[in-house]
Amino acid sequence: MSSPGKAECIGVIVVDHGSRRAESNEMLERLTRTAISERLAYGIVEPAHMELAEPSIGTAFDRCVGRGATLVVIQPYFLLPGRHWNQDIPELAAHAAAGHPGVSYLVAAPFGLHPLMAEVVSARVDHCLAHIRGEAPECEACAGTGVCRLRTAGAEEATAC
Protein backbone atom coordinates (compact mmCIF):
# COMPACT_ATOMS: atom_id res chain seq x y z
CA MET A 1 0.00 0.00 0.00
CA SER A 2 1.37 3.36 -0.93
CA SER A 3 1.43 6.28 1.47
CA PRO A 4 -0.66 9.32 0.57
CA GLY A 5 1.27 12.06 -1.13
CA LYS A 6 1.16 14.73 -3.78
CA ALA A 7 1.30 12.23 -6.63
CA GLU A 8 -2.00 10.69 -5.59
CA CYS A 9 -5.40 12.01 -6.43
CA ILE A 10 -7.64 11.56 -3.39
CA GLY A 11 -11.33 10.81 -3.60
CA VAL A 12 -13.64 10.81 -0.59
CA ILE A 13 -16.80 8.74 -0.17
CA VAL A 14 -19.16 9.82 2.59
CA VAL A 15 -21.23 6.75 3.47
CA ASP A 16 -24.26 6.41 5.70
CA HIS A 17 -26.31 3.33 6.48
CA GLY A 18 -28.94 3.95 3.84
CA SER A 19 -32.67 4.12 4.38
CA ARG A 20 -35.92 2.97 2.87
CA ARG A 21 -36.98 6.64 3.14
CA ALA A 22 -35.81 8.44 0.01
CA GLU A 23 -35.81 11.76 1.91
CA SER A 24 -33.17 10.44 4.32
CA ASN A 25 -30.93 9.24 1.52
CA GLU A 26 -31.34 12.54 -0.30
CA MET A 27 -30.19 14.44 2.81
CA LEU A 28 -26.78 12.75 2.77
CA GLU A 29 -26.49 13.16 -0.99
CA ARG A 30 -27.33 16.88 -0.78
CA LEU A 31 -24.96 17.43 2.16
CA THR A 32 -22.14 15.61 0.38
CA ARG A 33 -22.57 17.40 -2.93
CA THR A 34 -22.79 20.85 -1.32
CA ALA A 35 -21.35 21.59 2.13
CA ILE A 36 -18.92 18.68 2.37
CA SER A 37 -17.64 19.04 -1.22
CA GLU A 38 -17.14 22.77 -0.68
CA ARG A 39 -15.34 22.28 2.63
CA LEU A 40 -12.96 19.45 1.77
CA ALA A 41 -9.67 20.12 0.01
CA TYR A 42 -10.26 17.14 -2.30
CA GLY A 43 -11.92 17.66 -5.66
CA ILE A 44 -13.54 14.24 -5.74
CA VAL A 45 -16.31 13.69 -3.19
CA GLU A 46 -19.13 11.19 -3.60
CA PRO A 47 -22.06 10.13 -1.40
CA ALA A 48 -22.86 6.47 -0.77
CA HIS A 49 -25.24 4.30 1.22
CA MET A 50 -24.02 1.11 2.86
CA GLU A 51 -27.25 -0.67 1.98
CA LEU A 52 -30.89 -0.18 0.96
CA ALA A 53 -30.22 2.55 -1.63
CA GLU A 54 -28.00 3.75 -4.44
CA PRO A 55 -25.40 4.98 -4.84
CA SER A 56 -23.71 2.07 -3.09
CA ILE A 57 -20.11 2.08 -1.90
CA GLY A 58 -19.22 0.19 -5.07
CA THR A 59 -20.92 2.76 -7.31
CA ALA A 60 -19.30 5.66 -5.45
CA PHE A 61 -15.89 3.95 -5.60
CA ASP A 62 -16.25 3.48 -9.37
CA ARG A 63 -17.20 7.16 -9.71
CA CYS A 64 -14.17 8.29 -7.69
CA VAL A 65 -11.79 6.20 -9.79
CA GLY A 66 -13.55 7.34 -12.96
CA ARG A 67 -12.86 10.93 -11.90
CA GLY A 68 -9.15 10.15 -11.41
CA ALA A 69 -8.81 9.03 -7.77
CA THR A 70 -5.86 6.78 -7.01
CA LEU A 71 -6.59 6.81 -3.26
CA VAL A 72 -10.17 6.57 -2.00
CA VAL A 73 -11.06 7.48 1.58
CA ILE A 74 -14.36 6.05 2.79
CA GLN A 75 -15.68 8.29 5.59
CA PRO A 76 -18.49 6.64 7.56
CA TYR A 77 -21.26 9.10 8.42
CA PHE A 78 -21.67 7.32 11.75
CA LEU A 79 -21.27 8.57 15.29
CA LEU A 80 -19.61 5.63 17.02
CA PRO A 81 -17.56 2.54 16.13
CA GLY A 82 -19.55 -0.63 15.61
CA ARG A 83 -19.96 -3.60 13.32
CA HIS A 84 -20.72 -1.47 10.26
CA TRP A 85 -17.44 0.42 10.68
CA ASN A 86 -15.37 -2.53 11.85
CA GLN A 87 -16.68 -5.18 9.44
CA ASP A 88 -19.38 -4.27 6.93
CA ILE A 89 -17.90 -1.12 5.37
CA PRO A 90 -14.37 -2.58 5.11
CA GLU A 91 -15.80 -5.66 3.36
CA LEU A 92 -17.84 -3.54 0.94
CA ALA A 93 -14.82 -1.30 0.32
CA ALA A 94 -12.57 -4.29 -0.38
CA HIS A 95 -15.11 -5.66 -2.82
CA ALA A 96 -15.38 -2.27 -4.57
CA ALA A 97 -11.60 -1.85 -4.72
CA ALA A 98 -11.07 -5.33 -6.17
CA GLY A 99 -12.21 -4.03 -9.56
CA HIS A 100 -9.56 -1.30 -9.51
CA PRO A 101 -6.05 -2.80 -9.21
CA GLY A 102 -3.49 -0.30 -7.97
CA VAL A 103 -6.04 1.98 -6.31
CA SER A 104 -5.53 2.30 -2.55
CA TYR A 105 -8.31 2.89 -0.05
CA LEU A 106 -8.77 3.78 3.59
CA VAL A 107 -11.83 3.36 5.78
CA ALA A 108 -11.63 6.39 8.09
CA ALA A 109 -12.91 6.49 11.66
CA PRO A 110 -16.48 7.44 12.54
CA PHE A 111 -16.99 10.82 14.22
CA GLY A 112 -16.76 9.32 17.69
CA LEU A 113 -15.33 11.60 20.32
CA HIS A 114 -14.16 14.29 17.92
CA PRO A 115 -14.14 17.61 19.81
CA LEU A 116 -16.36 19.33 17.25
CA MET A 117 -19.20 16.91 18.07
CA ALA A 118 -19.90 18.91 21.26
CA GLU A 119 -20.39 21.99 19.07
CA VAL A 120 -22.76 20.06 16.79
CA VAL A 121 -24.84 18.84 19.75
CA SER A 122 -24.93 22.35 21.25
CA ALA A 123 -25.97 23.93 17.95
CA ARG A 124 -28.75 21.39 17.39
CA VAL A 125 -30.16 21.76 20.93
CA ASP A 126 -30.03 25.57 20.69
CA HIS A 127 -31.77 25.54 17.30
CA CYS A 128 -34.54 23.16 18.42
CA LEU A 129 -35.20 25.24 21.54
CA ALA A 130 -35.31 28.41 19.43
CA HIS A 131 -37.74 26.67 17.08
CA ILE A 132 -40.21 25.71 19.80
CA ARG A 133 -40.06 29.32 21.09
CA GLY A 134 -40.98 30.48 17.57
CA GLU A 135 -37.60 32.14 17.01
CA ALA A 136 -36.28 29.81 14.28
CA PRO A 137 -37.67 27.71 11.44
CA GLU A 138 -37.65 23.93 11.54
CA CYS A 139 -34.22 22.46 10.84
CA GLU A 140 -33.49 20.52 7.65
CA ALA A 141 -34.15 17.20 9.41
CA CYS A 142 -37.59 18.19 10.74
CA ALA A 143 -38.82 20.47 7.97
CA GLY A 144 -42.38 19.61 7.08
CA THR A 145 -42.62 16.64 9.44
CA GLY A 146 -44.23 18.26 12.47
CA VAL A 147 -41.96 16.14 14.66
CA CYS A 148 -40.20 19.03 16.38
CA ARG A 149 -42.75 20.00 18.99
CA LEU A 150 -42.81 20.41 22.72
CA ARG A 151 -44.47 17.50 24.51
CA THR A 152 -45.65 17.23 28.08
CA ALA A 153 -45.72 13.88 29.89
CA GLY A 154 -49.29 12.78 30.59
CA ALA A 155 -50.84 15.39 28.29
CA GLU A 156 -53.15 14.05 25.58
CA GLU A 157 -52.20 16.65 23.01
CA ALA A 158 -48.64 17.81 22.46
CA THR A 159 -47.94 21.50 22.09
CA ALA A 160 -47.14 22.20 18.44
CA CYS A 161 -44.31 24.49 17.49
Image (cartoon, rainbow, N blue to C red):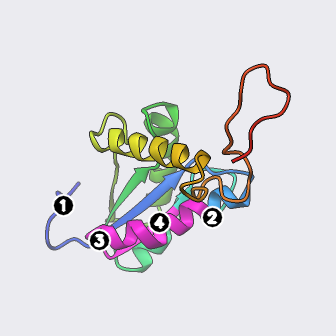
Q: Earlier in the sequence, mark 4 or mark 1?
A: 1
Q: Which residue is mark 4?
A: 32
Q: Earlier in the sequence, mark 4 or mark 3?
A: 4
140 or 96: nearer the viewer? 140
Residue mark closest to the camera, 4 vs 1: 4
Q: Which residue is mark 1?
A: 4
> Which residue, as the protein is rendered here, is positioned at the far bottom?
67
Q: Which residue is mark 2?
A: 26
106 or 135: nearer the viewer? 135
Residue 88, placed above or below residue 99 = above
Q: Circle 2 sits in a helix, a strand or a loop, which is it?
A: helix
Residue 42 is tagged as 3
> Which residue, as the protein is rendered here, is positioned at the far left?
6
Residue 117 pos. (x, y %): 35, 41
Please give the name of the residue rendered at 37% of the width and 42% of the height, measured from the top-left corner. 111
Amino acid found under the numbered disc labelled 4: Thr
Bounds of the magenta segment: 27-47
